[in-house]
Structures are given as structure tokens and as C-alpha cells.
Image (spheres, grey):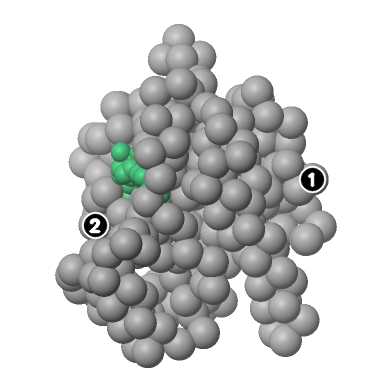
Amino acid sequence: MSETCIVAIANQKGGVGKTTTAINLGAALAKLGHQTILVDLDPQGNASTGLGIDLEQRELNVYDLLAGDESLEECALGTDIDNLKVVPATSDLASADVQLSQVQDRIRLLRRKLTDSSQGKIVLIDCPPALGLLTLNAMVAADSVLVPLQAEFYALEGLSQLLSTVQHVRQTANPDLRINGVLLTMSDYRNNLSQQVEADARETLGELVYQTVIPRNVRVSEAPSHAQPVLVYDPASKGSLSYIKFAEEFATRARIAREVA
Ligand code: ADP
Ligand code: MG
């Protein structure tokens, strides 16, 4: 996958595994040898923290990328993982909606910065749990949207609103935007409900749903407090292995999508 690939990881629901997926897909793709940049677009900055970026290191951050003159290269910090960089977020981003409300072309701010400088790289954008200006910026900049769905009751609820936002972006600012796929997360195979949600999702969404399912695994939830992806924190854990498998499926799918496009 030497061509550019910009993916917005989005779902307006919180707690569905967006940030966990951004960190661990990013780490897994980097380990597979892809130049990967994670753009942390959530004011909570959990993806930055989870990759070990201290607050003091965030002087240049994603707000500068959006609103300033800084380039992607200038804002991207190295991590402990080869091939993986992150553009960190700070809580300043929480007021971006208001701060940027008068800026012209405010939904194209991220696209403007990514178009030239993302060549040959994979850019993963960790979106906040809302369909506001920040997520719109991600969707306008991206070539596809990856949707994590938590394998629990109500998982599919809210999906139609997300898909109609994608449709809206396609009709206005980014006609090439595709759905990359849907990733089921935090699945518990001892629980019939998880299996039911998976069956429902596959029936409703068909091939959009990735074959790989991420299991609920305590090592995944522990890893951020050690400021590491689970791939580093516990490489042999079920969570780690599932994200590696997912990264391989993701890379294959991205290639296939390009071949048929
Ligand atoms: P979002 O970014 O969509 O709000 P997160 O990725 O932050 O969601 O995940 C929400 C919570 O669930 C976090 O505490 C995270 O550590 C935990 N979590 C995510 N994926 C898993 C998993 N596969 N197994 C166990 N816990 C998980
Ligand atoms: Mg998050």
C-alpha cells in the first residue's frame, strides 16, 4: 500500500473503540512497514496520550494544523514505534467549532494540509464523538470512513445518521468519499448478544463489515494507562493479535478498493 490512504475513524457515539482502533490499527500498519500518521482530532487527546505523548510535547498540535500555517510534517511527532507518527491534540480543540465558525472554507482546513503532504502515507484520523466541524473536516479530507461499532445492543442505532452525514459530504465537499468498512469491537463470544449484534450487522451491512472482529480483552483497556498500543504492551494478547489481523485485512481491502475503482 504505497499509495496515499486517508481514513477518518468516525462514529458519533462515544466509547465504541474509535481511539483504540486508531492507536492499534496505526501501530499494526506501522509494524507491517507502512508510513503511518495518526491525526488526533478529539479534544480529549486520548490517542496522543495512549501513544505516550506528554502534554509538554504538544506545543505544536492539531489545532495548528487546522488553523495555522504549520504543515503536517511540522505537526507530526515521532512515537516509540518505527513508522508511526502522531499529530497530537489538546483540550484547546474543544472550542474549535466556535473559534473557527467565521473562517472561510472551514470544513476544508484539514484537507488543505493533507492533500500534498500525505503522499505515500496512511493517515488515520481519530474523530471526536460528534458529527460537528471536526468530524466534517476529517470526512472532507479523507478518502474513506472506517466505522467502529461496539458489539452491543443499540449498536446499529445512530448508524443511519452517520451514513447520511457521509452522503452529505459526498454531495457537497468530497464526492470521492467511500465507506471503508465497519469494524465490530469489544465483542464477547460468551455473550449471545454479541453474536446477535454481529449477525444483524452482517445481514444489514453485508460485505462492509470486516471479517475480523475485535474481542473484548482486558489487555486492550489496560494498555493506554501504560501509554502503549496493546501490540507493544502485550503482543501475544488476544486484543493485539486481533488488531494485527484487522490491519492485514484493512491493507488488503484498501488495495482491492483501488484495483476495482
Ligand atoms: P471511543 O474513542 O469511540 O470513545 P475508546 O477507543 O476510547 O472509544 O474505547 C472506550 C473504552 O473501551 C476505553 O476505556 C477502551 O480502553 C475500552 N476498549 C476499547 N476497545 C476495547 C477492547 N477490545 N477490549 C476491552 N476494552 C476496550
Ligand atoms: Mg475516542
Q: Residue at x 39, y 30 (%)?
A: 222
Residue 253 versus residue 101 in the image, above or below: below
Q: Secondary structure at mark 1?
A: loop
In the image, is the residue at mark 2 within 8 Å of ligand 1 by its beta carbon? yes
Q: Residue at x 18, y 68 (%)?
A: 153
- Label at residue 216: none
Query: For the residue carrying disc 2, how many other residues have a C-alpha within 10 Å: few (<14), some (14-19), or many (20+)?
Result: many
Q: Nearer the viewer, residue 102 or 95?
A: 95
Query: Is residue 34 shown left or right of residue 18?
Result: right
Give the residue at mark 1.
33
Query: For the residue carrying disc 1, how many other residues have a C-alpha within 10 Å: few (<14), some (14-19), or many (20+)?
Result: some
Q: Nearer the viewer, residue 261 or 24?
A: 24
Query: Is residue 245 shown left or right of residue 163?
Result: right
For the C terminus, give its image quadrant. Answer: bottom right
Instruction: Determine if residue 127 is in view.
Output: no
Give the residue at mark 2.
13
Residue 71 place in picture, x, y as percent: 62, 35
Q: Residue at x 56, y 32 (%)?
A: 234
- Labels 1 and 2: the sequence-earlier one: 2
Residue 251 versus residue 200 in the image, above or below: above
Residue 218 versus residue 248 in the image, above or below: above
User: Which amino acid lies under the numbered mark 2 shown in the image of this protein?
Assistant: Lys
Q: Nearer the viewer, residue 79 or 211?
A: 211
CB atoms of marks 1 and 2 within 8 Å: no
Q: Secondary structure at mark 2?
A: loop
User: Which amino acid lies under the numbered mark 1 shown in the image of this protein?
Assistant: Gly
Count of marks, rendered view? 2
Quadrant of the rendered image containing residue 168: bottom left
Quadrant of the rendered image containing residue 148: bottom left
Residue 207 place in picture, x, y as percent: 51, 84
